[in-house]
Image (cartoon, rainbow, N blue to C red):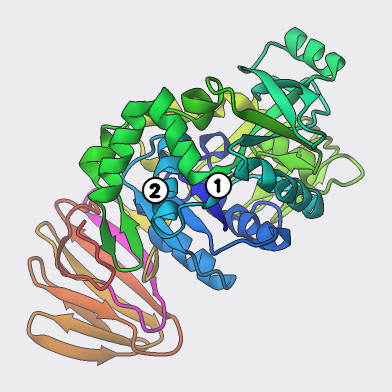
Amino acid sequence: MLIPVILSGGVGSRLWPLSRESYPKQLLPLVDEFTLLQNTLKRLEGIADKSAPLIVCNENHRFLVAEQLRSIGVSPKHIILEPLGRNTAPAAAVAALSAIASDPEAVLLILPADHIIANQQAFAEAVNAGVPLALANQLVTFGIVPNAPETGYGYINATDAINNSVALSVKRFVEKPELETAQTYIASGEYYWNSGMFLFKAAHYLKQLENFAPDILTASKQAFHNAKTDTDFFRLDATAFKACPSESIDYAVMEKTHAAVVIPLDAGWNDVGSWSSLWEISEQDNEGNVSLGDVLTENVQNSYLRAEHRLLTAIGVKDLMVIETADAILVANKDHVQDVKKIVSRLKADARNETELHSKVYRPWGSYECIDNEQRFQVKRITVNPGASLSLQMHYHRSEHWIIVQGTAKITRGEESMILSENQSTYIPLGVKHRLENPGKLPLEMIEVQSGSYLGEDDIVRFDDIYGRHK
């Protein structure tokens, strides 16, 4: 049985400020109404004899991932939670261990959750052609037929066909080249972009890890066997997984094995690795511009302009990437978008939360958005989904005023329980246990005014939570 494994653990820092650690690019609808994760799952439809997918994601994204799967009608085999990112080799290892527990002959299709593939039929044909090779204990990767001397990708050197199949034997993997080197690769016709997509038997991949990266296999096994089931999730043991080396499948296995083969793929692939790559694949106007949201331009060429919350205007510029969010704006030349990671690194060094959170933060029960704050007060707009409930909690350093704007709220305050509706309010004193629920069929909208000496999100003591959260 073919088991798709979707790796959704990245943070997509090169697409900051839209992509953040708490809401990374694979969870965003960047090219159409579906997110990159959802489109990855939807393109599996043309692949034969497949089972339900395995999802590997960061534990902080678990509810977002589960909701995105539910909204497109996908029921996963498991959602495996990583306590932190350890690159693709360990992620594939725990997926392989999960797969062989139910099918010792399982074949894994490893797919990053943040790629775009325009020609889904060509993709499905390549995967279907690779299955017999995987069953024959070949480690299949998919090499993208290059259309430019790209310096942002690694390359695979491959020439000789294998047993009259569509696959080629791999001579070597090479790191991201300089431009002149990349140009020679393209001219030779013997190099392909390294896509990071793989197809192999789960058991054979684990055997290869045992040969070439036994420390990864040992740590992955320990993390898997000490894992715990948490509601709908499979939570890896944090201590064991944190001790695992952080390596890619390429570095840990593919560059060392003699069983690697590559299938050339020409299917309109893009890893959406930067704002310029997103500009390239988006629909452009006659001036080469991509304008999304409330955007007005005058004499602008070859630019990507994205307004998320307010009017964005541009005059007399070209080759710019301008992305507006509620709390940050990026302006970059199209040829320098790879340096966005440097800005993100500087923000992290300054301990600024713009790298982690948007002003609107999603939770399993709904969302909240900070609309005003000063040193001793903060105002939030809170949305609670129908039937959802916040945890029973208390705060040591703040009190809260709640004003119901829309819908119906069931409120627990100490030993009291009350129902409030539109234009009604209540007060939650510091140190009092409380809970907010939406018993209605419509979203509950509420304004919360916090006041106190400390207003951080870590000032929450949870006593009971239906989502299994402890922090």
Q: Which residues are magenta?
A: 374-390
**Farthest-out residue, right:** 286
In this rendered view, identify the residue nearer to me: 14 or 40. 40
Could you say which quadrant of the image residue 166 lies in? Answer: top right
Which residue is label 1 attached to?
Answer: 25
Q: Element at badge 1?
A: helix
Does the magenta portion include 93? no
Residue 399's x, y, as percent? 16, 65
Q: As shown in the figure, which amino acid type bears the numbered disc 2?
A: Leu
418 displayed left or right of 52: left
The residue under the point 8% across, 80% down is 414
- The mark closer to the camera, 2 or 1, is 2
Which residue is label 2 attached to?
Answer: 97
In this rendered view, identify the residue nearer to me: 287 or 263. 263
* Residue 245 visible in rendering: no
Q: As shown in the figure, which amino acid type bears the numbered disc 1?
A: Lys
